Amino acid sequence: MTRGPHFSDSQAALFDFDEARKTVAAARGRQPSYIRDHRARLRERFLVGGAAALPDYELLELVLFRAIPRRDVKPLARQLLETFGDFNGVLSAPRSRLEDVPGVGEAVVTELKIVEAAAHRLAQSRVLGRPVISSWDALIDYCQAALAHGEIEQFRVLYLDRKNVLIADEAQARGTVDHVPVYPREVVKRALELNATALILLHNHPSGDPTPSRADIDMTAQVQTAAEVFGITLHDHLVIGRAATLSFRSEGLL
């Protein structure tokens, strides 16, 4: 029996043998040895010495490895740090600004935002459900991680029970670069819904300077007055700057 032509018999080869072999190798995307060796050394240093053993640009390289598997990411890491200031600034930068950096695409943004979300979740786990007094330093760290690098003002409220255990952290409002609207009635209403007996107010100053404005002071007094009507204590109002946090109570403003 005469065998009819198969597709493979009749179809002309797209590449000659050598070209095809080169194309397959390229498609596999093997890293150049210098990139592969550098990544292995960096991972080893991280595993042995932890994050403290790496400067910001190398820690950022580790994050970028997954997003950009076959290219030297050191130049991009340095560019991101130059643009946004430090490691935390890169992680918390808005997506739109990240995408303005040459070399940053969907994969890079996704990796950065996963790490940012993980950092916030970890910081929150160290304070939620715990007495605020015994975890005050962790609370400040959490507030800094959540708000210090925001480019618009955000207002949050921490709700506490009778034992000063943090039972909820909720965003109340988002504003502009220098103002956020706050409604004392809504703050107190939510406290009653949660059966909270104390509050800590939080908001950030995108300028970086945590010095409270006259409007901040007046709003805090209004929330305190509204809360006292229902026997709810306002413990503090924390203003988060880029490098420092100001406490109303410590400053004698409460």
Image (cartoon, rainbow, N blue to C red):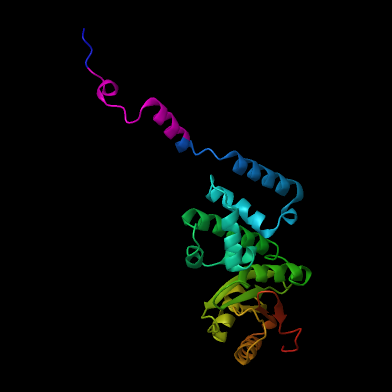
**Residue 46, position in %: x, y?**
71, 49
Query: Split into 4 quadrants, where in the image is the C terminus?
Result: bottom right
**Residue 71, position in %: x, y?**
54, 47
Q: Is residue 191 above or below residue 99?
A: below
Q: Count how many numbered circles sit on residues in the image.
A: 0
Q: Identify the residue at image location x=39%, y=25%.
A: 17
Magenta span has 104? no
Quadrant assignment, res 141:
bottom right
Quadrant assignment, res 235:
bottom right
Query: Split into 4 quadrants, where in the image is the N terminus?
Result: top left
Q: Residue furthest top?
A: 1
Residue nearest the observer in this picture, 41 or 180: 41
Quadrant assignment, res 85:
bottom right
Q: Is residue 148 above or below residue 90?
A: below
Q: Is residue 14 above or below residue 79?
A: above
Position of 3 with respect to 31 (left or right) is: left
Q: Residue furthest right?
A: 134
Principal secondary structure, stretch drawn in magenta = helix
Q: Identify the residue at image location x=57%, y=85%.
A: 184
Residue nearest the observer in this picture, 70 or 46: 70
**Residue 51, position in %: x, y?**
71, 54
Position of 10 with respect to 225 (left or right) is: left
Position of 60 with respect to 244 (left or right) is: left
Residue nearest the observer in this picture, 12 or 146: 12
**Residue 92, position in %: x, y?**
58, 66
Q: Identify the residue at image location x=64%, y=87%.
A: 220
Magenta stretch bounds: 5-25
